Amino acid sequence: MGSQPHVIVVPFPAQGHVAPLMKFSHQIVDHGIKVTFVSPDFIHERLTTTMPMKSSIRLVPFPDGLEPGDDRNDTIKLTNSFLEALPGHFKDLIEQINESDDERVSCVITDGMVVPALKVAEKMGIKRAILCLAGPATLALVLSIPKLIEDGIIDAKGTPLKNELIWLSKEIPAWTSTKLPWSCPGDSESQEFIFGHVFRVNHFVKQCNWLLCNSFYELDSLALNLIPEIMPVGPLLLANQSGSHIGSFWPEDSTCLSWLDKQPVDSVIYASFGSTSTFNQQQLDELALGLELIGQPFLWVVRSDIVNEAISEFLDGFRMRIADRGRIVNWAPQEQVLAHPSTACFLSHCGWNSTLEGISMGVPFLCWPYFTDQFQNKSYICDVWKVGLELNPDENGIITRHEINTKIKTLLFDDGIKTSALKLKEMAKKSVTESGSSFKNFESFIEQIKH
Ligand code: UDP
């Protein structure tokens, strides 16, 4: 019997990695290729409860390597333990699949951060594809880490040694020493953890058979041209035909869509800060009061995992006060919210997925970056694509209600920003439709896997 192409997809165990790789998996399956999707069992459980699954995608849970009583809220410990335990299980899985005549593994796809899976595949002579889930400029900077170390700009742990701007080219926004793709202000443990992972990516990018990314050529041709072998295949959310909610860790509160239906066109401020950003009480109060001050309807995502008792009490009072003028949800169907005609702007932490989602829907941004690549994404949004404005903290590091109020009002009256956002939206759509740049790259990737 002829063998059907079969790929194993292994995302880094975080929301911003699992969801786009799941979207990509659905796209691959639609082209007649079998997909096995591997995740630690705590993520597997969430995926099976929140997601309708195509029968052709097989979800495989792997043990996370921790003991039953261990704390699973410690992301670094959990991720390290999962990645350490992965090689043995992964090798067994590949051998087990390969035993079946019509199901040999043709390719392993990861986002580059799952180095142990790439190592196993390399050893077993299996082809490897890396799908980069950050922006092309971020990847280009990560690929220049060895040179940055050699030039004495950073040390081997990623700590800046010089307080100077880093330029990749004159047209690409420079990085300051405190806003590098692994920078986590005030959290050196996370910074070292992220740096360790992105540093290792360097070797494997050069060894892999395909380097793909969730972007499109027209969005950032200058950065993409710095990485000759790269094939942009995004935005994955537009290329995917299987619906927006695949790969979510939390159940989406869809009631906000009927609330959006009742709001005037172009009136709602959508505030959402991704899957990991957190607020202290003072900053959360300022944000709430800022949203109230604007006097327009707003939809605000406050994840259940950032709510402690004090925040919860404050939010209860706030909810009562604003009544139906605003909605607070645990987790929103973000892509549908951004595509909704009532949504006027996106108050965002500028994670790469959120950035591409806002761009794909033509929504202007108000940028509130926290760490890592979010700083560079903000620079692109505000200075290169000119589709948003940045919020600036006061001298105490707080983004005040007045700053939020003033910037949102400025943004909503800026026709130039709205026009640029709509132009990018059209470009994004074009790239994934037949004969578009990402469409062609994806077709070429699929053809190569099949043959
Ligand atoms: N997201 C969502 N509902 C929410 C908030 C976020 O579906 O209420 C999704 C969002 O659409 C995006 C992802 O979570 O795809 C967040 O990824 P991003 O890269 O923007 O940020 P991260 O979570 O990695 O910081």
Image (tube, rainbow, N blue to C red):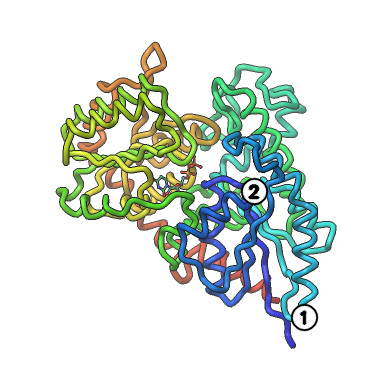
Q: Nearer the viewer, residue 194 or 51?
A: 51
Q: Which residue reaches farthest top?
A: 395
Q: Which residue is denoted by mark 1 in the rendering? A: 101
Task: State whether residue 425 is above or below residue 194.
Answer: below
Residue 129, disc: none
What crowding class fits label 2: few (fewer than 14 Cα within 10 Å), some (14-19), or many (20 or more)?
some
Task: State whether residue 432 is above or below residue 293.
Answer: below
**Residue 8, picture quadrant:** bottom right
Label 2 is placed on what type of residue?
Ile
Residue depicted at x 71% and y 41% = 81
User: If you read the primary sequence from the N terminus, does the residue marked by circle 1 or circle 2 appear first?
Assistant: 1
- Considering the numbered disc 1 on the image, is that residue within a helix, a strand or a loop? loop
Q: Look at the image and tell me whether residue 211 can be seen.
A: no
> Ligand 1 near label 2 (Cβ, under 8 Å)?
no
Q: Where is residue 261? Give x, y as percent.
A: 19, 54
What crowding class fits label 1: few (fewer than 14 Cα within 10 Å), some (14-19), or many (20 or more)?
few
Q: Which residue is denoted by mark 2 in the rendering? A: 227
Residue depicted at x 40% and y 61% = 429
Callout count: 2
Task: State whether residue 379 is above or below residue 188.
Answer: below
Q: Is residue 77 left or right of residue 315?
A: right
Q: Nearer the viewer, residue 381 or 115?
A: 115
Q: Which residue reaches farthest bottom?
A: 1
Q: Where is residue 24? Give x, y as percent.
A: 54, 61
Q: Where is residue 290? Give x, y as percent.
A: 25, 26
Q: Which residue reaches farthest front?
A: 69
- Considering the numbered disc 2 on the image, is that residue within a helix, a strand or a loop? loop
Residue depicted at x 62% and y 29% = 190
The quarter of the picture showing ligand 1: top left
Label 1 is placed on what type of residue?
Asp
Mark 1 and mark 2: span between their CA atoms? Answer: 38 Å
Split into 4 quadrants, where in the image is the C terminus?
Answer: bottom right
